[in-house]
Amino acid sequence: MNIKCAIFDLDGVIVDTAKYHYLAWKKLAEELNIPFTEKENELFKGVSRMRCMEILMELGNIQLSQEEQVKLATKKNEWYVDYISVMTDDELLPGAKEFLIACKDVGIKTALGSASKNAPRILKALAIEDLFDAVIDGNKVSKAKPDPEVFIKGAEECGIPAENCVVFEDAYAGIEAAHAGNMLGIGVGTKENLPIADVIIAGLHELTVEGMKEILNDK
Ligand code: BG6
Ligand code: MG
């Protein structure tokens, strides 16, 4: 494929915030007496806040009213926002900023495709908004990953057809969303967690833009 646009998930791909989502959900799960480890947390990656709440209820085999769900998800978000309120450049994942700049240098468009409603706050705190030609986040979509809406909107805003886009994702649901949108999905993580990814990298520090182009030429 001929790559013209790279679409990046935020949490766990650009910034090291996936760990804070995990800690906040774990805290809530413990309050509800629901066992919660990194294994269960894989199901929470990439999906919207309220969908996470539903998954938590499924894991605990409990039922809560809509009002109670919103209350608990809001509480989780307050803990999460506390964690990220002291965020510095140190939270940028290795190679992420450099890779975004390198894409722009060779004329590859860049888009953010995140489920998070906190994305604008994070981009601003790290002063990286300008590295994206399009920013699509949880405030701009109505359907959560694995629905491809977030990536389709990113491609559209960049003016690039889906077949020329590649998605970087650390979530299983995110790779599913890329595929549903007819895009290749580069998994950031492990083969074990992301068996359906077209390519696996441990992080953006592992990849150069030339290296990415070479890998994608064969796809
Ligand atoms: C995604 C995370 O980026 O954003 C999910 O991987 C999270 O775990 C989702 O649930 C929604 O985030 P927020 O910040 O809107 O609660
Ligand atoms: Mg993620």
Image (cartoon, rainbow, N blue to C red):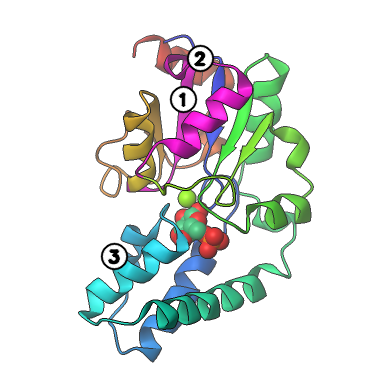
**Three-letter code for the amino acid on which mark 1 is drawn:** Val
Disc 2: which residue: 3
Q: Is mark 1 within 8 Å of ligand 2?
A: no
Q: Report the residue at 34% width, 67% height from top.
A: 38
Nearer the N terminus, badge 3 or badge 2? 2
**Three-letter code for the amino acid on which mark 2 is drawn:** Ile
Proximity of marks 3 and 2: CB atoms separated by less than 8 Å: no
Horizontal side of residue 18 vs 99, given as left or right: left
Disc 3: which residue: 39
Horizontal side of residue 6 vs 186, given as left or right: right
Q: Report the residue at 44% width, 57% height from top.
A: 48
Q: Secondary structure at mark 3?
A: helix
Nearer the N terminus, badge 1 or badge 2? 2
Disc 1: which residue: 166
| Residue 169 vertical position relative to residue 59 in the rendered view, above or below | above
- Counting from the top left corner in percent of width and height, residue 130 is at 77, 36
**Three-letter code for the amino acid on which mark 3 is drawn:** Lys
- Counting from the top left corner in percent of width and height, residue 23 is at 48, 74
| Of residues 136 and 142, the one drawn nearer to the viewer in this rendering | 142
Q: How far apart are the two marked residues, 3 and 2, measured between alpha carbons?
A: 33 Å
